[in-house]
Amino acid sequence: QVQLVESGGGLVEPGGSLRLSCVASGDISNIDGVRWYRQAPGKQRDVVAFILGSGATGYPDSVKGRFTISINRETNKMTIDLQMNSLKPEDTAVYFCNAKVRGIDVWGQGTQVTVSS
């Protein structure tokens, strides 16, 4: 099993930055790709960044150039960070970490990001 725990959300003014972290523990050797998603009230959950098993990264146009995903691997855990710069009010959402483990989606509990003046 893999467990994901997010942290780093909060309230930030437009133009500001936040760094979200997701700590993966457990059977991390079987993780094949990680993603950050977000879900605003009344909207579907959308991916905002991903790293594939090959190391390739990708972002939708809405966050490209502003968000950066990175991974730090240690012996017993993996940390997946999402650096978010030049934040806009439309970035307000609950952000979720996701990992594919043997083809099965594993989710964190989510962390709230609010961009407001």
Image (cartoon, rainbow, N blue to C red):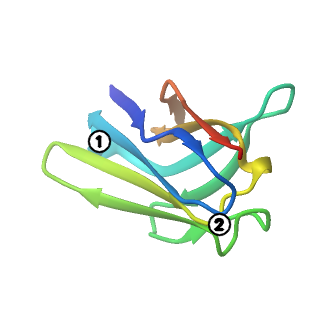
Secondary structure of the residue carrying numbered label 1: helix
- When asked about the image quadrant of residue 38, the answer is top right
Task: Point out the residue furthest to the bottom here.
Answer: 65
Where residue 105 appears, as percent x and y from the top left, is 55, 32
Residue 13 spot, x, y in % from top left: 64, 51
Place of residue 34 in the rendered image (x, y in percent of width and height, measured from the top left): 49, 50
Residue occupying the point 79% across, 68% down? 61
Residue 45, numbered label: none
Q: Which residue is mark 1?
A: 28
Closer to viewer: mark 1 or mark 2: 2
Q: In screen coordinates, is 42 left or right of 101? A: right
Q: Residue furthest right?
A: 42
**Left or right of 3 in this view: 26:** left
In this picture, is 112 found above or below 29? above
Quarter of image, res 85: bottom right
**Residue at the spot 51% in from the left edge and 29% down from the top edge:** 107
Above or below: residue 47 compared with residue 9:
below
Front position in the image: 86 or 72: 86
Name the residue nearer the viewer: 64 or 47.
Answer: 64
- Amino acid type of the residue that numbered disc 1 sits on in the rendered structure: Ile
Label count reads 2
Q: Amino acid at mark 2?
A: Ser
Say left or right for 78 vs 36: left
Judged from the image, the secondary structure of the residue bearing numbered disc 2 is: loop
Would you name the residue on which mark 2 appears?
86
Q: Is residue 28 left or right of residue 70?
A: left
Q: Residue at x 77, y 34 (%)?
A: 40
Crowd rating for badge 1 (residues with CA inside 10 Å; few <14, some 14–19, many 20+): some
